[in-house]
Amino acid sequence: MATVATSTAKGVMFSVSALFFTTAVGISPATVGTGLTVAGAGGVVTAFAAGPLCDRFGPRRVLLVAAAAQGGALAAYCLTRGAAMFVLVACLAVGAESVQRTAHVALLARAFTGPDRVGVRAWLRVVDNVSIAAGSGFAAVALAVGSRSAYVTAVLAAAVLTLVALVPLRALPALSGGGGDRPARGGRSPLKDRRYLTATALHAVVSIQFLLLTVGMPLWVTGRTAAPDVTVALLLLLNTGLVSVLQVWSTRLVGDVPSAGRAVFRGTVLLLAACLCYAAAGYPSGAGFAVALLVAAVVAHSLGEIVSETGGWELAFEWADPADSGAYQGVSQAGVGIGRAVAPVLVTSTAIGLGLPGWLLLGGVFLAAGAGTRALSARGQAPRPTPSARRTVSPRRR
């Protein structure tokens, strides 16, 4: 229920934030871009810093504080005047959201064991996608009205939804054996774990594919193909549908560390195939042929996203020290944040700027990261800690 509330708010903000900042607040597009870039960089730092906080105070407490801070920051957007205040509020909002992501994963890592963790995360990702779509639908009303009051109402609704998430979060039980709000015992620092850092760096490269879909694909479709502009919305809807239907199924492909590495590699092979289809759609052809190639590209892209994410989750959970799970998940989430931060520049300078050579280069980068992950995981699964060291509980299966 908390995911439904926060993700619906996220969908609202995805749809209205740009126009809200430029129309209702009066900030220039350049200032909005700069401010969000600064906030994104700060979000990488807070995602990492949230890990030790989860180990010290418990992930649920950190999650509650971060959700309250983000709800307050979204409401503060409506009072923003001037560039300096906008950047300050944006840093608070993005930083709080980054803390929530780390605390969310740390809570899963400590509340569930074995395949249950990846399975629960897959279900929550489905809920996340559906709720974002619902939030975007609600935001369409504000976009249709187009007035300042409509945008302010939408942003305030997002703030209220984020604060509503505090109710189900507070209702989470205090899990025995070190879960819930109970701090974990100190363990090995993830910054000294070269294998985990390597896996995190490789996954950060693969995570560039998220921005390839939301930044690169729209620019490519509208600027370099014969497909109509409305194709962009249909392709994004196709991606959302495939992820919602297949994400839970993909957990069947992963049962241990070696299978997770193979899943990541297979996912990057599909991402390479998607890059080839995207590139082919840019060659002179009829609109129908271009749309068909783009549909094939998004299907391959979505399957690659689903499979590689499932494998990445398994490695992030299994290679983390249970006694220091928050710090490890903080490193993992910071890596994803770095990948997404550099993605817009990388995607626009390769695929969009160079055309076919750029698409081949980008696809090759994905494949290299997948091959590296498979090689790293093929060395065997790390010995599992004893149940007393894991300090976790397994849920009853429904």
Image (tube, rainbow, N blue to C red):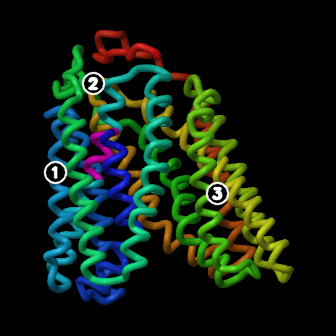
Q: How many marks?
A: 3
Q: Which residue is drawn at the image coordinates 58% and 41% (left, top)? A: 373
Describe residue 113's horizontal placement relative to residue 266 as left or right.
left
Q: Viewer-nearest of labels 1 and 2?
A: 1
- Residue 157's x, y, as percent? 26, 62
Q: Which residue is drawn at the image coordinates 23% and 14% (left, top)? A: 177
How many angstroms separate mark 1 from mark 2 (CA)?
A: 27 Å
Vertical arrangement, residue 101 with respect to residue 28, above or below: above
Mark 2 neighbour density, 10 Å: few (under 14) some (14–19) many (20 or more): many
Q: Amino acid at mark 3?
A: Leu
Report the predominant secondary structure element of the magenta stretch: helix
- Residue 332's x, y, as percent? 39, 44
Does the residue at mark 3 contact the one at mark 2 (Cβ under 8 Å)?
no
- Residue 83's x, y, as percent? 20, 84
Vertical arrangement, residue 101 with respect to residue 281, above or below: above
Q: Which mark is residue 238?
A: 3
Task: Write down the residue under mark 1.
Answer: 68
Q: Amino acid at mark 1?
A: Ala
Q: Residue 183 occupies which quadrant of the picture?
A: top left
Q: Which residues are magenta?
A: 98-104
Disc nearer the start of the sequence (3/2) = 3
Q: Which mark is residue 133?
A: none
Q: Amino acid at mark 2?
A: Ala
Describe residue 331's horizontal placement relative to residue 227 as left or right.
left
Does the residue at mark 1 contact the one at mark 2 (Cβ under 8 Å)?
no
Task: Write down the residue under mark 2.
Answer: 323
